[in-house]
Image: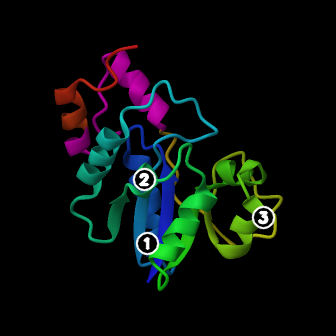
Amino acid sequence: MHIGLYFGSFNPIHIGHLIIANHMIEYTDIDKVWFVVSPHNPLKDSHSLLNEYDRLHLVNLAIENNPKFRASNVEFQLPKPSYTIDTLTYLTEKFPLEQFSIIIGSDSFQNIHRWKNYEQLVQLHPFLVYMRKGFEITETYGADINVLNAPVLEISSTFVREQIKAKKSIRYLVPDEVGNYIESNRYYKTK
């Protein structure tokens, strides 16, 4: 089975994430998308992160009716901060019959050379790169990449959190189940 690994903080998951994942299922040869919830991205500030188990639960709520999607907490058990190379080493040992590709935006791919052991990563795993405006792929770093023009919405988890803090609606930015759960648990209201 060919699995697309979609790494992220998903703080919180939003419609844009789901559109990208669905596009990958429809327009590549992957069979499933695993949303790999990262406890802490070493390249991002963690002060605004919701607890990883709460973020995992929100991902599960968002994808519960899609059998081609799966939420993964694999990085919860690995040393922190999470590094993609370590996660993929673990996954390929645990699931030797699966093929893993990395789903990534062109903005993040431009920083791949800053990732731990990126040379090994690009040698061992293909990349499914969705284009983001203003971030053209000019260097592949030797990676096997498939560049896709997926429908990218200008929505970010930061924007969703800002809307919540400003007491604005997040309807249509996140799935209804996610929005209702965030509201009932008063996530992202403070700070």
Q: Nearer the viewer, residue 50 or 158?
A: 50
User: What SS does tag 3 mark?
Assistant: helix
Q: Position of residue 145 (x, y in %)?
A: 69, 71
Q: Mark 2 or mark 3: name the one nearer the start of the chain.
A: 2
Of 162 and 74, nearer the camera is 74
Identified by mark 2, the residue type is: Gln
| Residue named by callout 2 | 77
| Disc 1 to disc 3: CB gap under 8 Å | no
Please indicate whether residue 136 sits to the left or right of residue 32 in the image.
right
Circle 1 residues within 10 Å: few <14, some 14–19, many ≥20: some
> Tag 2: Cα neighbours inside 10 Å, few (<14), some, or many (≥20)?
few
Q: Is residue 112 above or below residue 93?
A: above
Is 4 above or below relative to 18?
A: below
Region of the chain picked out in magenta, as a range: 156-178
Q: Is residue 130 above or below residue 96?
A: above
Residue drawn where x is 57% and y is 29% of the image? 45
Q: Which mark is residue 119?
A: 3
Hey, which quadrant is residue 69 in on the image?
Answer: bottom left
Q: Which quadrant: the N terminus?
A: bottom left
State yes or no: discs 1 and 2 in contact (Cβ < 8 Å).
no
From the image, tell me which residue sits under label 1: 25
**Per the image, is 157 magenta?**
yes
Numbered disc 1: secondary structure: helix
Q: Position of residue 65 (x, y in %)?
A: 21, 62
Q: In the rendered structure, which amino acid carries the disc numbered 1?
A: Ile
Is 142 left or right of 91, judged from the image as shown? right
Measured in 3D between alpha carbons, the distance from the residue under mark 1 to the one under mark 2, in whole angstroms, is: 27 Å
